[in-house]
Amino acid sequence: MGVPRQRKTHSERNQRRSHHALSRIQVAKCKNCGSAVMPHDICGACGYYRGTEVVKKSVVTSKTAK
Ligand SMILES: [Zn+2]
């Protein structure tokens, strides 16, 4: 296994880590109900995607199915 020849300076270490910062999560609003949605995801609250109903939430959330 390779062993580092010399200890890196604080500057070299910090320059390497300058690309490690996390970016903020992008959040969009549902066009149907206005709740926060991840981009390119179906709305978890109402089941809509791009203005059309994709998942029927009334069927999914009903307790009478059991
Ligand atoms: Zn929605």
Image (spheres, rainbow, N blue to C red):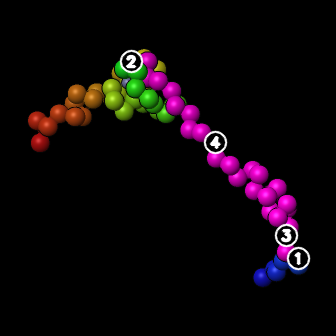
Q: Which residue is mark 1?
A: 6
> Is 55 displayed left or right of 66 in the figure?
right
User: Disc 4 marks which amino acid?
Assistant: Ser
Asked if residue 17 lies in the magenta stretch, the reply is yes
Of labels 4 and 2, the one closer to you: 4
Tag 1: amino acid: Gln
Q: Residues within 10 Å of mark 3 (few under 14, many from 20)?
A: few
Circle 2 is placed at which residue position?
A: 32
Image quadrant for the C terminus? top left
| Mark linked to residue 23 | 4
Image coordinates of residue 53 in percent, x first then y, are 36, 21
Q: Report helix, strand or loop for mark 2.
A: loop
In terms of depth relative to the viewer, which is nearer, 52 or 8?
A: 8
Residue 55 x %, y %: 33, 29
User: What residue is rendered at 27% in x and 29% in y?
Assistant: 57
Residue labelled with disc 3: 8
Task: Please state which amino acid type lies under the numbered disc 2.
Answer: Asn
Density class for disc 4 (Cα within 10 Å; few <14, some 14-19, many ≥20) is few
The residue nearer to you, when weighing 50 against 17, is 17
- The stretch of residues the image draws in magenta is 7-31
Asked where in the image residue 49 lies, by quadrant, the reply is: top left
Earlier sequence position, callout 1 versus callout 4:
1
Gap in angstroms between the C-alphas marked 1 and 4: 32 Å
Counting residues from the start of the chain, the first of labels 3 and 4 encountered is 3
Q: Quadrant of residue 34?
A: top left
Q: Earlier in the sequence, mark 2 or mark 1?
A: 1
Q: In whole angstroms, how far apart are the C-alphas of marks 4 and 2? A: 27 Å
